[in-house]
Image: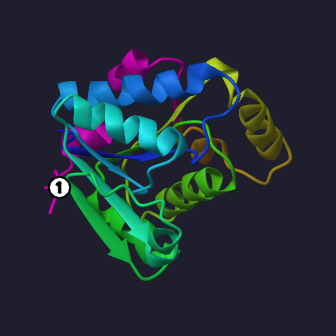
Amino acid sequence: MIRNIAVFCSSANGFSPVYRSAAEQLGCALADRNIGLIYGGANVGLMQAVADASLAANGRVVGVIPEVLVDLEVAHHGVTELHITSTMHTRKALIGEKADAFIVLPGGFGTFEELFEVLAWHTLKLHTKPILLLNINGFYDKLFAFLDHCVAEGMLKQKNRELILVADTVEEAFVKLNFHPAIHNSHSKELS
């Protein structure tokens, strides 16, 4: 059973309104399913969109933000809980600890770094939680082609390439997560 999902996404909105719309749909869907949202704690971009949508639908939202970003006044002080960490590393560790699964929306360097870190943790058997990319508007298509290139060049094992679940819509994302074997064999985490 999935109690909490970590969402990695951009602090920007992007040029197409489909990205913000997908973030809002995801926030509502989490609340509708009584799944807590754990995210980077910011009040800007897609991060704000997913959090505000979940809150508006009476969802539980936990933000985890490092002090340096609080000082830049981007912290979302309207969330259910806001954890302020000393570093980016402790932020990511806390998010990873609290999450039962990870969903990745479009983003930039920070989002990519979070994605690849949880993938690396999975390949090192530090967790078995599902990792899903919400491929809105084909945003990640070129990344998938690059990962396939990495497999073809012998730099990435096919079994590790297959760790990434992919969905084009929010509804498809929840279908894929519900059928993931780790969900049926894991202990859920309570928000604290």
Question: In which image quadrant can residue 48 be found?
Answer: top left
Residue found farthest to the bottom: 86
Residue 18 within the magenta-colored segment of the rendering: no
Q: Nearer the viewer, residue 176 or 170?
A: 170
Residue 162 can be seen in this image: yes
> Residue sitting at 51 percent across and 47 percent down?
44
Q: Amino acid at mark 1?
A: Lys
Q: Secondary structure at mark 1?
A: loop
Q: Position of residue 63 (x, y in %)?
A: 33, 57
Q: Nearer the viewer, residue 77 or 63?
A: 77
Image vertical order of residue 144 relative to residue 80, above or below: above
Image vertical order of residue 186 relative to residue 53, above or below: below
Residue found farthest to the right: 153
Q: Assign the C terminus to one quadrant of the image.
A: bottom left
Image vertical order of residue 58 relative to residue 137, above or below: below
> Residue sitting at 27 percent across and 31 percent down?
30
Q: Nearer the viewer, residue 110 or 143?
A: 110
Q: Position of residue 21 (x, y in %)?
A: 49, 21
Q: Nearer the viewer, residue 163 or 101?
A: 101
Horizontal relation, residue 59 to residue 87: left or right? left
> Residue sitting at 30 percent across and 43 percent down?
182
Q: Assign the N terminus to one quadrant of the image.
A: top left
Region of the chain picked out in magenta, as a range: 165-192
Residue beneath disc 1: 189
> Residue sitting at 16 percent across and 57 percent down?
191
Residue 178 can be seen in this image: no
Residue 178 within the magenta-colored segment of the rendering: yes
Horizontal relation, residue 24 to residue 12: left or right? left
Q: Position of residue 120 (x, y in %)?
A: 56, 61
Image vertical order of residue 112 relative to residue 31, above or below: below
Question: In which image quadrant can residue 149 be found?
Answer: top right
Question: In which image quadrant can residue 137 be found?
Answer: top right
